[in-house]
Amino acid sequence: MPGRRERKRGMDAAPAGHREGRPSIVLLEYFTETRRPVYTFFLVLPFVLLYEAGMIFLSLSAREWDVRNGADAILRALFFPSKLADAGTWGTVIWTLFSALILFGAFGWWQLRSAASWKLKPRHLWYCYLESFAWGIILLLLVIPLKMLGLPEGMSMAPPCSQGGQAEFGLLERIVMSAGAGVYEELVFRLFLAGGLILMLRGMLGVHRAGAAIAAVVLASLVFSGVHYIGDYGDSFTWASFVFRVVAGVFFSLLFHYRSFGVAVATHAFYDIIVNLLISAAGYARS
């Protein structure tokens, strides 16, 4: 009967409209939308600017300053001529421009390859920052049980640097180095190392996709943890801090895979910044 069919159609249409506003649908849209390269670009950009501008400012204000994040120093040693690396402030400026060119070039290639839209929703971008901050808090909470196992006081996952003379870092230097840790450690250990291992295990050794991903994530996380104990500013080794950093490496890898490179970078940087703010606050309270 026409009347009955119309009533039935109306009943079906209402739940469909209602479903569009359900939290699960909204979250799915957010997670799908924010995996696009343009969101990663704007998530990473503030931390790149903070770190690189901070490096230039510190090299101009302190003649003895030749300190960089460990992962950044690895890239600098591999790709930067030694004469320019030792050129003081001008070397820092040139490396900053070179690094920016690499990062923005990689983004442009990824954006063109994915053929994704260049448009973004500012509201979703702010949600990405809040989400990354929340993941950083969750990671910070994992430190609490490890404190009971002997985790060093004031432990931060970022190696402050791997080159330069002895120096004591103030809050500004710590925040600048934390931003660099988020960008360059995720670039080196998640994107390059873990990604390269997956390609090698699958392409050269024929390992199954899932097995290659698990092996690559574990190996990259072990290396990520190990580099924190190398260099003039490396931490003192303890099994508790080593295990935590391995867990953190796996944590960042999961964010990189299931969310995006940008969320992994922002989470890492936020975590390190929070830890260093807590360290400074504790030192101020003791004084």
Image (spheres, rainbow, N blue to C red):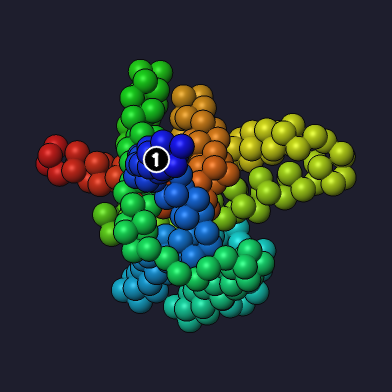
| Drawn side of residue 103 relative to residue 29, left or right | right
In the image, what residue occupies the spot 69% across and 37% down?
213
**In the picture, residue 223 is in which quadrant?**
top right
Q: Farthest residue in the front direction? A: 1
- Number of callouts in the render? 1
Task: Residue 207: give x, y in percent of width and height.
Answer: 82, 36
Disc 1, SS: helix
Please name the residue shown 54% across and 46% down the image.
256
Q: Residue 120 at x, y = what percent?
A: 42, 65
Q: Quadrant of residue 282?
A: top left
Return the residue nearer the eye: 247 or 209.
Answer: 209
Q: Is residue 222 left or right of residue 61?
A: right
Give the residue furthest to the top: 148
Disc 1: CA contacts within 10 A as few (<14), some (14-19) or many (>=20): few
Q: Considering only vertical position in the picture, is 51 above or below 7?
A: below
181 or 236, which lies in front?
A: 181
Q: Quadrant of residue 74?
A: bottom right
Check the picture and name the quadrant holding the C terminus.
top left
The three-letter amino acid code for the residue at tag 1 is Gly
The answer to whether residue 255 shows anywhere in this view is: yes
Residue at (46%, 37%) from the top-left corner? 1
Name the residue tied to disc 1: 3
